[in-house]
Amino acid sequence: MSKKLLQKQADTIRFLAADMVQKANSGHPGAPMGMADIATVLSSHLNLNPSNEKWLNRDRLVFSGGHATGLVYSLLHLWGFNVSIDDMKQFRQFNSKTPGHPEFGHTHGIEITTGPLGQGIANAVGFAMASKYAQNTLGKNVIDHNVYCLCGDGDLQEGISYEACASAGHLKLDNLTIIYDSNNITIEGDTSIAWSEDVKKRFQAIDFEVLEIDGHNFKEIDEAIVSAKASDKPTLIIANTAIGKGAATMEGSHHTHGAPLGVDEIKASKEKAGFNKDESFVVPSDIKDAFDKLTKGAEAENRWNETLSVETKEKIKVLQNPDFDSIVYPEFEADSSVATRDSNHKCLNAIAQALPGFLGGSADLAPSNKTELKGMGDFPNGKNIHFGIKEHAMAAMTNAMNLYGLYRVFSATFFVFSDYLKPSARIAALAGIPQHFVWTHDSIGVGEDGPTHQPIEHLSQFRALPNFYTFRPADASENVESWKVALKLNAPSAFVCSRQGLRVLKDEKEIGSVANGAYLIKKREGATITIMGSGSELMLAMQTACHLEKDGIIANVVSVPCFDLLVEQDKEYIDSIIDPLTKVFAVEAGRGLEYYKFADEVYGMDTFGASAPAGELFKDFGFTIESLVERIKKDL
């Protein structure tokens, strides 16, 4: 392809991005203009099929920086995805296909919602991990695609990128290429005001192949991508670029980063490049043909399909359509004592035995989280993933693994450390990614480790997150039922499990089930109060109800394994389990403020915990039968 045509392709991208930002009067023209040359050359290497964006063996391209959004939509249009010129004209407008940051499931061709800087790098590592596992289980002749990530200075400054890339180097993910748009500019100005590290040495230290090029030299860009595909290591291509490349007077200025160039600047830039200065959103016919991937992509997928054996096709079909009803869940003896982290361990193993595509791991806490899948080997050949102590990257990598198209993947850590992965959990909720989070050591029951390790506000935090389902089972049997529900949700879910043993309750649901989020476990005639609880506090609620009855106070008891599902129920169901004529009390060894949606009084934590044996803490913080009986009587 001639340099002249390549230049025209790149300039077309530049001006589409600049026009989008100008029309919206909002956005980032600098990065798309600076990366246009890279995107043009990379386009010739990508195997994509816009007529089937879910083709399993397609290359994955992740745009980590949201400030490259104009580049994303320009490329999707030019490649033949369902993003039109009219869609680009609606950039950043309400209900458009082209929101301010690309969203998975919203815009055709977007592989994953990246959002905050650094997420996309971890997502790309996750796609590469899933691809490597697929190679090892299906064969390298079946899965041979590549994973690319375009990132910037901001992505590499975020700590999540280092966590993820360290894993990529350790796992030798040779199918991963990260292209770093090194323009030395962030919002506040030159990167030197806050950043002076040697990126090349950093990545060499974590066993990456590192190449450095002129990001505006088409030949160097092409040679670097070819070299990366041949490497036996993950590759970082440091592409030195000028932000706002092609802008008539503003090229290289940080002022191009997050604001429109202005009408006069765009006209002057177009005129300088040989484009009509008075036309906007123009794609010359020869340029559309040069970028078009529809025909080539469909042909590539057809050739790939022809190479698959009947056996391989069946394996892929089974992975893509897991039979959740085939799982043989463990059973637990009533009145026995089982920590829900232990019952959850048995559930995880039962699911992994039944579903070939179920795998996962922990942030170096498998013995404590009880997440080991026994006898199932270590990743990338087996199902046990050792993420290392990298909660933030672990969750983002797992998000991508769940969107790869074959697997259902869980991640695990202590509940208090969910703080470290909240941004990734939020993206999972926003994008509807069915990741399963396993969070153990769920309350002040952690005990001697003290307040730094005792989650207090965390249940409230995740219950407040839309499209996220937090299960806190009260016993082993409720744990099983929670998994049956969670596996069929088109959304992320969390299993918040106890360290301490919990008594296995008899199956005595009066009204409702775990699928309703809450159910009436004890209904008494003439009840004047209702006590709600989850996890370890449910047994406390039941025992308190028995003691109150001795004093003539009749109480119903409601188990709340999933508050998020409860609030989705209609009023008729809620009134059937929470009698409107009763006074309602909720008990939880956490903040529990969300219970005020249903409860008149909430007995929760108003402070952080303390370092002492769990039994002493529950007593000192008022989570005993005697304390609850006294408080309820007082409040009545």
Image (cartoon, rainbow, N blue to C red):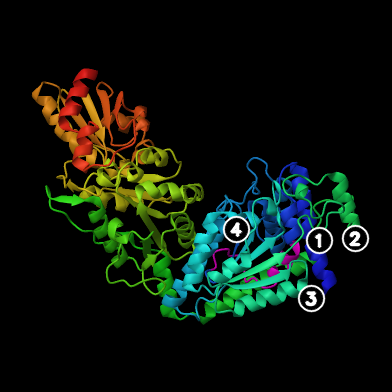
Q: Nearer the viewer, residue 467 or 421?
A: 421
The disc label shown at residue 11, or none? 1
Position of residue 211 relative to residue 105, above or below, is below
- Residue 487 visible? The answer is no
Q: Secondary structure at mark 4?
A: helix
Q: Which residue is mark 2?
A: 274
Q: Where's residue 105, x and y in %?
A: 55, 53
Q: Secondary structure at mark 1?
A: helix
Q: Where's residue 157, x and y in %?
A: 59, 55
The disc label shown at residue 1, or none? 3
Q: Secondary structure at mark 3?
A: loop
Q: Which residue is mark 4?
A: 156
For disc 1, the neighbor class at 10 Å (few under 14, some 14 to 19, many from 20) is many
Q: Which residues are magenta?
A: 36-55
What residue sits 77% from the left and 59% below the top?
A: 242
The disc label shown at residue 294, or none? none
Looking at the picture, which amino acid does disc 2 mark? Gly
Where is residue 377, by image quadrant? bottom left
Looking at the picture, which amino acid does disc 1 mark? Asp
Say whether disc 1 or disc 3 marks the residue closer to the N-terminus. Answer: 3
